[in-house]
Image (cartoon, rainbow, N blue to C red):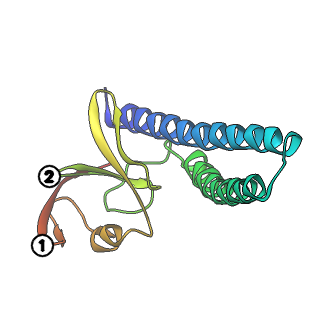
């Protein structure tokens, strides 16, 4: 598989991982809402009312996380993998180092594409700021760990 095809596979795998995260948040919110409905139908005392308030708080927290995950999905879906391959690190780059392979996109953490492990990082991540603009052969460090860039595409 050439680098352009691999980059498309990496993006597709990243989108799939992000969609799973979105689905998980939505499923959990649906579960909480169905529990809230049951409590509303049989609410008898202050203890149940307190529990209902806690569930509303959890739903609001999950809703915020879901919104953030959906914004990150939008960023992923706007990545142009048909653009020329990168020769320096920036948004959309795959950065191979002597320690691991990074995908500069959104906070995907570790995921697998084409049988290989990748670590999706956001442009807001401190490590991205260390590698921004670097080229093959350049080095950078993060948390006392040294990385040497072996390929970028």
SS for dot 2: loop
**6 left or right of 67 in image:** left
Which callout, 2 or 1, points to the residue nearer the camera?
1
Q: Which residue is mark 2?
A: 99
Q: Are marks 2 and 1 in contact (CB under 8 Å)?
A: no
Furthest residue to the front? 45
Q: Quadrant of residue 58?
A: bottom right
Q: How far from the left and from the top, in percent, is residue 36?
A: 77, 45
Secondary structure under tag 1 reads loop
Q: Image point 68% across, 37% down: which residue?
A: 31
Quarter of the image where one finds residue 33: top right
Residue depicted at 32% across the width and 37% down the height? 3
Mark 1, Cα crowd under 10 Å, few <14 / some 14-19 / many 20+, is: few
Name the residue located 81 percent from the left edge and 54 percent from the top edge.
Answer: 45
* Relative side of 77 to 63, left or right: left
Judging depth in this view, the residue of 39 and 66 nearest the camera is 39
Image height check: is 49 above or below 7?
Answer: below
Q: Position of residue 35 (x, y in %)?
A: 73, 40
In this view, the residue in front, 44 or 54, is 44
Of residue 81 and residue 146, the one placed in the foreground of this image is 146
Residue 44 bears which disc, if any? none
73 to the left or right of 36: left
Q: Residue at x 27, y 38 (%)?
A: 117
Q: Residues within 10 Å of mark 2 (few under 14, many from 20)?
A: few
Indicate which disc, 2 or 1, sits on the residue closer to the N terminus.
2
Q: Which residue is mark 1?
A: 144
- Percent position of residue 98, x then y: 12, 52
| Residue 131 percent coordinates (x, y) | 28, 68
């Amino acid at each position: 598989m050439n680098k352009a095809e691999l980059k498309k596979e990496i993006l597709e795998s990243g989108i799939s991982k992000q969609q799973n995260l979105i689905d998980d948040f939505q499923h959990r919110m649906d579960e909480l809402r169905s529990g809230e409905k049951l409590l509303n139908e049989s609410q008898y005392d202050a203890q149940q009312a307190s529990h209902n308030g806690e569930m509303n708080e959890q739903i609001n927290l999950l809703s915020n996380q879901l919104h953030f995950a959906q914004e990150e999905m939008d960023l992923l879906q706007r990545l142009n993998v048909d653009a020329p391959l990168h020769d320096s690190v920036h948004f959309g780059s795959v950065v191979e180092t002597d320690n691991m392979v990074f995908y500069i996109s959104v906070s995907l953490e570790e995921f697998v594409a084409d049988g290989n492990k990748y670590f999706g990082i956001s442009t807001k991540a401190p490590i991205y700021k260390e590698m921004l603009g670097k080229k093959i052969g350049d080095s950078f460090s993060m948390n006392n760990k040294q990385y040497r860039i072996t390929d970028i595409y």
